[in-house]
Image: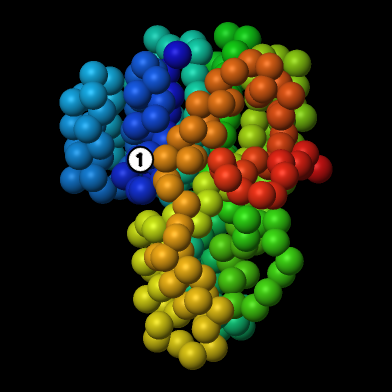
Amino acid sequence: MTAVVTGASGTIGGAIAQALAGAGHPVVAVGRDVRRLAALRDRVEADGGACATVVADVTEPGEWAAGLADRIAGESRLVLVNAAGVHGALGPVAETPAGEWTRVFGTNLFAAVAAVRALVPRMVAAGWGRVVNVSSAAGVAPAGPFNAPYATSKAALNRFTAHLAAEVAGTGVTAHAIHPGDVVSGMHGEIARMAAAEPRLAGYRAWAEATDAGGTDPEAAGRLVLRLLDDAYAEGHNGWFLWPDGDPRQPFRLT
């Protein structure tokens, strides 16, 4: 079994890649940051795991995914973790440039669609596979001000996951959306910087400070992905939204 993890140069994607490699599964780590990808590979290999790296911008339509499929042409049992993500601007809809919507949806949704189109047919043909889309509680929480592009992109990712799960049901392939928790990461830092500069974003500033004080261990997302390698658990939660260890909220089926 080989695992493909996009966004692996980020905190959450890197933690998931390291967890999979630590469990003995070769990982193909996809990301934009050459230095962070190399550091991830070094950590994995120091622990006795296998990690290949692919430097790619996942917002480039389809090209990177097609190349990735060619690179792992000899593999049949695959896990795909779509962890690439950006937050984007915080502000009113009318003040958010159209290009920002394109950037956020390109990374958070369309990159996942491209990877699924490239890899899921192979999973179905092999009779086994996992798709794990790293979503967010923002995609299922009550709507609020100033966060429309990110929250809408994650809600769309959840809906995409539900449709995919319905399509692959019974094939041995499953699809899931996960919330990784409130993690101190590059995205967290981006939100903190924006909130510090804008008084009307006081709620986001409070969230960033609370996360600094007691955020979720990024390894929790890795443990959640490893749990989904169990066939009984994965089949029983095909098309579900799942929370990390310790989160009091209950998993639920996406519809």
Question: Toward which corner of the image does residue 43 lie, by quadrant?
Answer: top left
Residue at x-position 40% and y-position 86%: 197
Q: Nearer the viewer, residue 152 or 106?
A: 152
**In this rendering, would 248 be left or right of 183?**
right
**Quadrant in the picture for the N terminus:** top left
- As helix, strand or loop, the secondary structure at mark 1 comes to helix
Q: Estimate the x, y position of residue 194 in percent, counting from the top left.
A: 42, 78
Q: Estimate the x, y position of residue 90 in percent, counting from the top left.
A: 51, 75
Q: Is residue 106 visible?
A: no
**In this rendering, would 115 be left or right of 170?**
left
Residue that badge 1 annotates: 14
**In this rendering, would 130 be left or right of 251?**
left
Q: Residues within 10 Å of mark 1 (few under 14, many from 20)?
A: many
Q: Nearer the viewer, residue 209 or 117?
A: 209
**Quadrant in the picture for the C terminus:** top right
Residue at x-position 67% and y-position 22%: 233
Question: Toward which corner of the image does residue 8 lie, by quadrant?
Answer: top left
Residue at x-position 77% and y-position 30%: 166
Q: Estimate the x, y position of residue 133 in percent, counting from the top left.
A: 57, 40
Q: Estimate the x, y position of residue 55 in percent, counting from the top left.
A: 28, 39
